[in-house]
Image: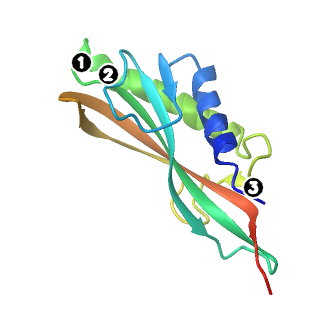
Amino acid sequence: MALDILGLTDALASHAMSLGHFEVVNGHEPKSTPGHGLTAAVWANQVKTLRSSGLASVSALLVFNVRVYTSAQSLPADAIDPDMLTAVDALCAAYSGDFTLGGLLRQIDLLGAHGEPLGVQAGYIQQDGALYRVMTITVPCVVNDLWEEEA
């Protein structure tokens, strides 16, 4: 079995697109300034093998980042975090409600049984000379029987 990276990325991005909170949803980490309003981006961050693998195949933990962006200069300033948290809350609820992403994986590791749980980290980044408020959701995905083991 091969890693369905496009299918998984599309499933995570589709949840974001379906919520109506974002002007743009990218399937990659942006290299240039995001658009106006809220933007979301989805990309793979890490792949690790898991001890829960069987004797004939290896399962893996694939960790995605889903980052929500908006200009740190948006007005009113007091609405930036509430607007972002509303979108982040909706995303986390969507990922919890579809924790197999339609059967593409064993589970989103909501509680961190295999490492870091589903979580959100807020911060700021500079992109093309502009300051952005960001909230990055860590989405750990457990994929069963990814690679065959040879005897």
Crowding around mark 2 (Cα neighbors within 10 Å: few <14, some 14 to 19, many 20+) is some
Disc 3 from disc 1: Cα separation: 40 Å
Query: What type is the residue that disc 2 sits on?
Result: Ile
Residue depicted at x 35% and y 15%: 36
Q: Looking at the image, which residue sits at the far top?
A: 75
Q: On the image, numbered disc 3 is attached to which residue?
A: 106
Q: Which of 29/40 is in front?
A: 29
Place of residue 70 in the rendered image (x, y in percent of width and height, measured from the top left): 34, 24
Say if residue 22 shows up in the picture.
no
Disc 2 from disc 1: Cα separation: 6 Å
Query: What type is the residue that disc 1 sits on?
Result: Ala
Crowding around mark 3 (Cα neighbors within 10 Å: few <14, some 14 to 19, many 20+) is some
Determine which quarter of the picture holds residue 83.
top left
Determine which quarter of the picture holds residue 147.
bottom right
Residue depicted at x 76% and y 47%: 104
Q: Taking 128 as reference, is 120 left or right?
A: right
Say if residue 59 shows up in the picture.
yes
Query: What type is the residue that disc 3 sits on?
Result: Arg
Chain-order first, disc 2 or disc 3: 2
Q: Quadrant of the N terminus?
A: bottom right
Q: Nearer the viewer, mark 2 or mark 3?
A: 3
Place of residue 61 in the rendered image (x, y in percent of width and height, measured from the top left): 61, 62
Q: Nearer the viewer, mark 3 or mark 1?
A: 3
Residue depicted at x 61% and y 52%: 110
Q: Is residue 23 above or below residue 126?
A: above
Q: Kindly indicate whether the residue at mark 1 contacts the one at mark 2 (C-beta within 8 angstroms).
A: yes
Chain-order first, disc 3 or disc 1: 1
Q: On the image, numbered disc 2 is attached to which residue?
A: 80
Disc 2 from disc 3: Cα separation: 35 Å
Place of residue 27 in the rendered image (x, y in percent of width and height, measured from the top left): 53, 34
Q: On the image, numbered disc 1 is attached to which residue?
A: 77
